[in-house]
Image (cartoon, grey):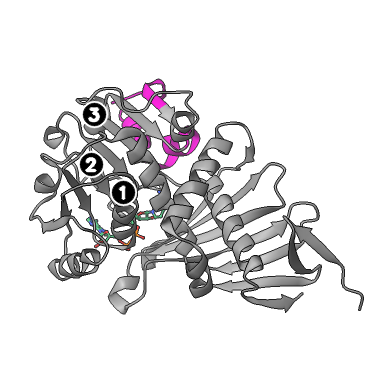
Amino acid sequence: MKQVRLDLVGMEMGSKNEVLLLTKEQIHSVLTMEDTIRVVEEGFKAFNSGKTVIPFPIGMQIQENRGEVHIKPGYLKRSETYCIKIASGFYNNPKIGLPSSGGMILLFDARTGVPRSLLIDRGFITDMRTAGAGALAARCLAKKSIETAAVIGTGTQARLQIEALSKVRNFRVLKVWGRNPANVKRYVEDMRQKLTAEIVPVGSTKDAVENSEVVVTATPSTSPLVKTEWVGEGIHITAMGADSPEKQELETGVLGIADKIVVDSVEQCVRLGEVHHAVEDGTISVEDIHAELGEILLGQKRGREREEEITVCDLTGIAAQDVVTSQLVYERALKAKMGSYITI
Ligand SMILES: NC(=O)c1ccc[n+]([C@@H]2O[C@H](COP(=O)([O-])OP(=O)(O)OC[C@H]3O[C@@H](n4cnc5c(N)ncnc54)[C@H](O)[C@@H]3O)[C@@H](O)[C@H]2O)c1
């Protein structure tokens, strides 16, 4: 059969009937945190420049297994490919030795709809692009100079968010709170390899939040873990765990006292994130949202302006992050002649 070859930014793709299959390990080998932060910034900027097509995501609950599935399609206008991501979180998985996040991303040719690549990343691209967003939120909103950061949760995001934070801010102390002491211990051991900061387990979320300058909340909690009265001047909070309507990590009062509330997407956060709860109970209105992150990155709106400001960034995860990150992985894999092809 005659095989037609297409060119993608000067690199050779498979034939029209071939789909490049990439495993998590291969994806891991071509994607660094620095790259992720860089492309995710471009994704947010594109999103706020009208250069993306991002339909509202589909969420499906598998309640009996504490599972959820998110389907996010995304297209960056004039790019060669579009993506559809199927990402899952099954929160009983750690008990049986499996990571909670999973899934895969499909990349299609934007000219023909023909599948180009199946990135079986088992949630890795989601994990990385979410951490990238956290780093950008801190870069825009945290004080320039900080001593103490804190993380609530000890799972995948608690690790990657802090690794990403360390790329944009130096901090001397990291406080960590988790429900399970064995997980906290493992977290401290693992993160010692990644950070120069002193890592201090704390006994309560109150201890984590009080006197911290950056706090990252990274759990699927459905009841608030951060109380308003613990939130002091100058703090920046990135709340990234709540990405579906039933999840909530911050008391709505935290958004009520914030000088600046920033979101990745207003449309998503009013339906899925922390903002959703605060709007619903009347603590804030949609007009109280200061900006979408991309607007700050584009210089259209201000990030932190004063040392004492309280800032909150609500992240629910947008497909613009997925599309730019998976395109980067695809391009790098093609260049490295990595992966295997399946014929369809
Ligand atoms: N905003 C986004 O773009 C985005 C992207 C990826 C993941 N997420 C969300 O972030 C959260 C964390 O994801 P992850 O991959 O790190 O999960 P994980 O399972 O690896 O870690 C979750 C952590 O939260 C703790 N936890 C679970 N339930 C809790 C509760 N009720 N109270 C306190 N702690 C609790 C667990 O013990 C664990 O330490 C999830 O809700 C996930 O859906 C959001």
Q: Is residue 102 above or below residue 176?
A: below
Q: Is residue 278 magenta?
A: yes
Q: Which mark is residue 214?
A: 2
Prevalent SS, magenta region? helix
Q: Give the crowd class for mark 1: few <14, some 14-19, many >=20 residues within 10 Å.
A: many
> Which amino acid type is marked by label 2?
Val
Residue 223 appears in the picture as rendered: yes
Q: Which residues are magenta?
A: 265-290
- Image quarter (top left, top right, bottom left or bottom right) of the C terminus: bottom right
Q: From mark 1 to mark 3, how far is it between C-alphas?
A: 18 Å
Q: Which mark is residue 165?
A: 1
Residue 277 appears in the picture as rendered: no
Q: From mark 3 to mark 2, how far is it between C-alphas?
A: 10 Å
Q: From mark 1 to mark 2, how far is it between C-alphas?
A: 9 Å
Q: Which residue is disc 3 drawn over?
A: 310
Which mark is in front, 1 or 2?
1
Q: Is residue 113 magenta?
A: no
> Which amino acid type is marked by label 3?
Ile
